[in-house]
Amino acid sequence: MGADPESRFEEIYALSYRPLLGYALRRCPDPDDAADVVAETFMIAWRRIEEVPGGEEARLWLYGVARKVLANHRRGERRHERRTEALRAELAAAPVVAGPSVEDLSPLARAFRTLSDDDRELLTLVAWEKLDTGQIATALGITRNAVRVRLYRARRRFARRLTEAGVERPQSVALEGSPL
C-alpha cells in the first residue's frame, strides 16, 4: 500500500471497473442507473481510499459498496414513486388540471397561447408572479436590460395578437404601464 492515493485508485479502477459495471448492469433495469451506481461506488472508493483493502480484497470491498449504493438507489426510487403517485392523486382531484379546451378559452387566452414560450414566460412572470425586471433578470439569468428589451417586444407581440383576435383594449391601458 505504499503507492500514492491517486495511483492506487487508478489501479483499483482499472482492475475493478468492468466487473463492477457488469454487477450493476445485472441489477439495474436501466443502463444509466447502472452507470450512476458504478460512478458513485468509485466516488466513495476515492473518498475512502485509505480504507480500501489491498489486492483482490479491493474488488470485493467495491462489490459491498456497490451493493449499498444500489440499495440506496432503490430506496430513493421507491420514495420518488410514492411521491409521484401522491402528486398524481392530488392533481387528479384538482379541478384545474384538465384545463379548458382551446374552443372554451376566451379570445384573450387564445391570443396569449399563440405567443412563444419565452414571451408567455416573461409576461406571466410580470402579471401573475408580480416580479419586477430585476427579479426576472435573476430568475432567468440575464441582465435587467435584456429583460426590458424582451419584455417590450413580448408586450408588442401580445398587443398585435390581441388586435388580430379582435380583443378591444381600453385606450387608458398603455402597454408600458400595465402588467401585460
Image (cartoon, rainbow, N blue to C red):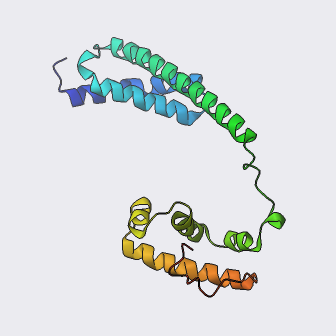
Query: Of 134 and 116, which appears nearest the observer?
Result: 134
> In the displayed image of the protein, which residue is found farthest to the right?
103
Q: Is residue 135 above or below residue 37?
A: below
Residue 93: x and y, percent? 74, 39
Q: Is residue 2 visible?
A: yes
Q: Is residue 138 above or below residue 75?
A: below
Query: Of 2 and 76, which appears nearest the observer?
Result: 76
Q: Is residue 76 left or right of residue 95?
A: left
Q: Is residue 62 left or right of residue 154?
A: left
Residue 82: x and y, percent? 63, 27
Residue plotted at (45% across, 79% down): 149
Query: Of 133 and 145, which appears nearest the observer?
Result: 133
Residue plotted at (63% across, 34% down): 84
Residue 56: x and y, percent? 35, 13
Q: Quadrant of residue 46?
A: top left
Residue plotted at (67% across, 71% down): 112
Residue 55: x and y, percent? 30, 14
Residue plotted at (73% across, 81% down): 167
| Screen quadrant of the C terminus | bottom right
> In the displayed image of the protein, which residue is found farthest to the bottom?
171
Q: Is residue 14 visible?
A: no
Q: Quadrant of residue 65?
A: top left
Q: Quadrant of residue 124?
A: bottom right
Q: Is residue 162 left or right of residue 1?
A: right
